[in-house]
Amino acid sequence: MSDDARWVAGLEAWARERLSASVLDYVVQGAREGTSSAEAPGAWREHRLLPHVLRDTTTVDPGVDLLGRRHPHPLVVAPTTLHRAVHPDGELAMARAVASHDGLLVVSSNAGTPFAAIGATGVRWWVQCYLPADRRLAEPLLDRAVDAGAGAVVLTVDTPVVGTKYASPGVPVVWDEVDPALLRVNFDAGYDGAPGSEKALDLGPADLARLTKRTGLPVVVKGVLRPDDARLAVDAGAAAVWVSNHGGRQLDRAVPTARALAPVATAVGERVPVLVDGGVRSGLDVVTALALGASAVALGRLPLYALSGGEDGVTRLLGELRSQTVETMRLAGARTAAETRSLVAPTPLYDGV
Ligand SMILES: Cc1cc2nc3c(=O)[nH]c(=O)nc-3n(C[C@H](O)[C@H](O)[C@H](O)COP(=O)(O)O)c2cc1C
């Protein structure tokens, strides 16, 4: 194993040396019994690939097309809270590192850095949002994101309430320790506690049209696990669907995304891009996701662990995952993301090959 591969494989332990116990606990934890968060990485390893040989792989291009733009690789940084508690440079360090790889950053609505400052780094970015019971309360934040150059709105739909998580024994709850000024700086003052600011329990297809109208941006629906819901979202105007169980932090026992992806991609992949996240820890996982129909592959915890080492940590992580992805594609005889589609081993093994 190269030094960087070993470093990525041990990233959680590396971050453990840099983060307070409560911040690390928050990042690692899953909801309730932790079943979905624990099984996510292993679910990618359940799949098997059927590689091509006798193919010229002198040139391998891991680039993907997403919402009308070419991206040089399929890696997306998923929206996560608490960047500034992980590293003082927070979202700015994350943005600079992602920009150095010409990647895509999805910024959480809970971010602790003004959208304008994130946009000023030059990174390509999308804004993530939840919708409150009173939809109008979300509008100032969305307007700020549009003004700061967000390229799409990612509506997270798996969070009607925040799933219960338990701190590890003896570890203080993060919210008792973290300075609230490091969070949610893009909301209007007084948002929290305002009547109607609780998360909407009645999200529906009409919200997609409303978001599109307000922002003029493509709307990506994050948190879909079922083909019927994927069709519903696309019929309602979703520009992309994001297969996610929120890193196992919402409904525990929700299926692993490594299993949910292919049925969703079959249902809507011809119509819109399908992103996926959950337990992706290596280039092998990235290529497996592409093979199962993903248009791009997002990372939640890994970039946060890497951010504990600042911008350089995230730059190193993305560089190593990108090179693992290219190596995996070369070994599998796939020269493009499209060619990875034929790699999933069918059952029985050589049916239709
Ligand atoms: C610490 C943490 C905070 C998160 N915050 C958000 C958030 O604000 N909005 C959101 O849509 N998803 C959030 N997520 C979920 C991620 O976007 C993503 O779906 C998940 O982390 C992917 O799984 P992985 O961590 O195994 O890569 C968060 C995840 C973590 C670990």
Image (tube, grey):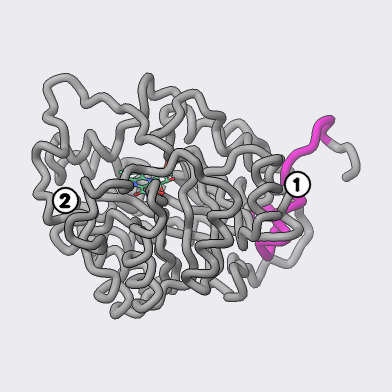
Would you identify the image quadrant in which residue 83 lies? bottom left
Q: Is 332 situated left or right of 92 in this image?
A: right
Q: Is residue 353 magenta?
A: no
Classify mark 2: residues with Cα within 10 Å, few (<14), some (14-19) or many (20+): many
Which residues, given as a range, are shown in magenta? 328-349
- Residue 19: x %, y % from top left: 15, 44
Q: Is residue 82 left or right of residue 149?
A: left
What amino acid is at disc 2? Ala
Nearest the camera: 39 or 266?
266
* Of pointers 1 and 2, the one earlier in the residue sequence: 2
Residue with the most extreme front position: 195
Q: Which residue is mark 1?
A: 266
SS at badge 1: helix
Tell me residue 98's x, y (percent).
37, 67
Q: Residue at x 60, y 70 (%)?
A: 67
Find the distance from the CA under tag 1 to the CA under tag 2.
Answer: 39 Å
Q: Disc 2 designates what residue?
A: 85
